[in-house]
Image (tube, rainbow, N blue to C red):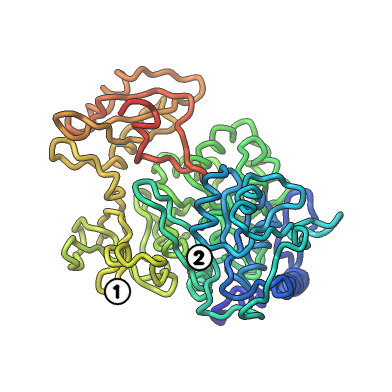
Amino acid sequence: MPEENTIRALLERGEAGSPAIGAPGRRDLDYAGLRAHVDRTVAGLNELGLGRGDRVAIVLPNGPEMACAFVSIAAGATTAPLNPGYRKAEYDFYLEDLGAKALILEAGAESEALDSARGLGIPVIRASVPDGSEAGKFELASDAGSVRGTASATGAAGADDVALVLHTSGTTSRPKIVPLLHRNVCASAENIRTTLLLTAGDRCLNVMPLFHIHGLMAPVLSSLSAGAMVACTEGFNALKFFSWLDEVRPTWYSAVPTMHQAILARAGRNAAVVAKSRLRFIRSSSASLPPQVLRELEETFHAPVVEAYAMTEASHQMTCNPLPPRVRKPGTVGPAAGPEVSVMDDEGHLLGTGQVGEVVIRGANVTPGYESNPEANAKAFTNGWFRTGDQGVMDEDGYVRLTGRLKEIINRGGEKISPLEVDEVLMDHPAVQQVVTFGVPHAKLGEEVAAAVVLRDGMEATPNEIRDFAAERLADFKVPRRILVMDEIPKGPTGKLRRIGLAEQLGIA
């Protein structure tokens, strides 16, 4: 396929009558309808005084309209998707920090974002779904004529226009704004499409939130780049997953490890649906996938599981384990899958095979840099390479094994401990369903090792039993001194387990 450098150009790949965007229980929107909808949306935004470079915040529930809003608005302005679960103080920060020129809300919704926008003087646009319309289609109308002015630049966005702005998670510092150009996100969509061997015949079931780079890029934009179809659900729901699997008949889905684990926990009760599923592969990203979970997924669905390594600043994918017949290496995140990937030491020297350092990347999918933050950019970029903040090592075949986030490495009296290594050992305990290892402040050692675990249904294990299990397999200094058995481990808004700040969140700091 020829390379396209804008989202609107990328949509030309789909056959006019082929399904593009769908949803359980809804009629599909085909590519001809999607392209027409995108063009109408861009023209409508221009009429409302919004155009290229103008930032449009989007607070819509997960589903086909959110997916369609992303591609439609990005085609003529800059999208800024925000979590519908935020509270007013969070909306105040994000809307002001982004310099949003307008906010799009669902018609009739009384989101706290509305109060925030009104307080900041940001115009509000309502998105309504006409009765009986195809999945994804919506109409825009200004709230009481609140949008004012004239768009400074109208028409379709270009390759160097900003398509999408997202904030970093900000777990240890103020969130940074990551601008992603059309050429960045299109390069990433192409990388994912190529890695997954996507064709127009594929159907993706999206269960990821669409205010996050994972959902926007892997299920949505990579599918559209292949002329394929993406079915957009209301968001992850383990109780509904198997009915969606049965109705949509997807060839693949992408999720974070905690979602895969929740699916596995219910797979036995849905054996008939699993038996007739047509999954060609399963993808995992956004957090480390325990090899034990990978094996169980493959045994359950009889489909290969590929783990990808991704981040917002790279427009998502950086490495990925390849599909058969190429070699997959559980415990690694695969070789480079689009950008160049290497490992660097603190002084900026690239390291060789088997040497541990910071994973670095460069390529067409990488952001030009954080917005208005020269200090962060100076730390993040070295000799043209972007520093990911992840520690890892590359083997002789170019496969990357991550040993942890540099900020998450536990420093116990000078001994550096990878929480991922401890996770992997604890996951081998037959009663353990889920685990996250993290550091707890210690008066003399600086940090001590702790772990939170969730047990499998119907199984029991005490903290001492789990600790003894770990002590037989780990050096003494790596064994968690504190193990918490929990019904559920707190997760972030995208379903990821968070290590940083977990001790404080659990009240054991």
Where 257 sits versus 146, above or below? above
Q: Residue at x 48, y 68 (%)?
A: 180
Quadrant in which residue 147 is drawn = bottom right
Q: In the rendered image, which residue does mark 1 sit on? A: 384
Q: Mark 1 or mark 2, which is nearer to you?
A: 1
Amino acid type, callout 1: Gly
Q: Is residue 183 left or right of residue 118?
A: left
Q: Is residue 256 visible?
A: yes
Q: Quadrant of the N terminus?
A: bottom right
Quadrant in which residue 43 is drawn = bottom right
Q: Is residue 15 visible?
A: no
Q: Quadrant of the C terminus?
A: top left
Marks 1 and 2, Cα distance to the nearest angstrom?
A: 23 Å
Q: In the rendered image, which residue does mark 2 sit on? A: 192
Q: Is residue 141 left or right of residue 356?
A: right
Q: Nearer the viewer, residue 405 or 26?
A: 405
Q: Residue at x 54, y 62 (%)?
A: 217
Q: Is residue 412 left or right of residue 62?
A: left
Picture coordinates of residue 141, whole percent (x, y): 77, 62
Picture coordinates of residue 318, whole percent (x, y): 40, 63
Task: In the displayed orientation, state which residue is furthest to the right.
Answer: 131
Q: Secondary structure at mark 2?
A: helix
Picture coordinates of residue 394, whole percent (x, y): 26, 60
